[in-house]
Image: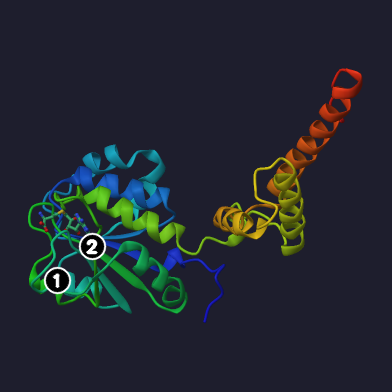
Amino acid sequence: MKSSTERICLDHITIVLQRPRFPENIGAAARAMRNMGIRRMIVVEPENYDISRVLKMATHVAADVVQEIQIAHDLRGALSPFHLVVGTTARLGGEREVVQSPSHIAFRLISLSQENTIAIVFGPEDRGLSNEDLRLCHELVNIPTAEFSSLNLAQAVMVICYELFTAGRPLMEQNIPRLATRHELDGMYDQLRDILVRINYINPENPDYWMNKIRRFFTRLQLKAGEVSIIRGVCRQIDWYGKKRHECRNDGCGIDSPN
Ligand code: SAH
């Protein structure tokens, strides 16, 4: 089992476009790949490979991806060196029975991609991958959509590349909160119970009834240490204010904050 901080080996991923019809889509797909750190592209039997139209959509940033595109003459030959072939499909049913979501496949590729080369295949804009093409794929992936399921080719490439790029991001890159410890939480609950009883918010005969509700509510929030400090600060202030009011009833003094 690989560690949760591992990422997909993007160097082992190749985007394969089967018979794309519009050079602009090839360029936009190259740009999407470049955004997500994927550089290898194979284009099989492009209908009209006009490099200037490809480059226009790729922009200069993805020009290197475009320069290195391999042009292939049949899908079977293009896919033969790969260890795993993943097909993408907008349609479901028939030969497209077992399909996975992009995030699910990305998760699986975290470990597989360390030792294996992987091709992700996209079909032509008008008809998608044929049944014969699909038989070359080990797995199929579908991007969930509302009722209109067919994405623009380059946008489908972007969604898949994004999932591959973000899968298994090292935990360091994510903003991981420091949750409050059990000890910090228990201190907060004691203080809350005390103050809520004293201000008559909860019944002193049965404080646990309300405290359990409050605990459940806070547990759902997964409080951070700093947030526990805020709640404890509010309790202290309520406590201080109540005492001060009590004293002032007797001698009429002004109220200043303790802070
Ligand atoms: N009209 C075709 C869709 C072609 S779109 C059809 O109904 O099959 C061109 C390619 O983009 C598809 O072959 C597929 O590779 C990809 N694509 C588009 N929408 C997709 C989706 N919802 N899920 C997965 N891939 C999709």
In the rendered image, which residue does mark 1 sit on?
Answer: 96
Q: Residue at x 10, y 69 (%)?
A: 93
Q: Does label 2 point to a residue whose CB lies under 8 Å from ligand 1?
A: yes
Instruction: State the residue at coordinates (45%, 62%).
Output: 167
Residue 142: give its label.
2
| Element marked by disc 2 | loop
Residue 139 found in image quarter: bottom left
Q: Amino acid at mark 2?
A: Asn
Label 2: few (<14), some (14–19) or many (≥20) C-alpha neighbours in 10 Å: many
- On the question of residue 150 being in view, the answer is yes
Colour treatment of the image: rainbow
Residue type highlighted by circle 1: Arg
Visible residue check, residue 82: no
Q: Which mark is residue 211?
A: none
Q: Residue at x 24, y 39 (%)?
A: 52
Task: Give x and y (percent) for residue 57.
Answer: 28, 39
- Coordinates of residue 89 in the picture (x, y in percent): 18, 62
Front-most of residues 50 and 164 = 164
Question: Is 19 situated above or below 76?
Answer: above
* Distance CA(mark 1)–CA(mark 2): 9 Å
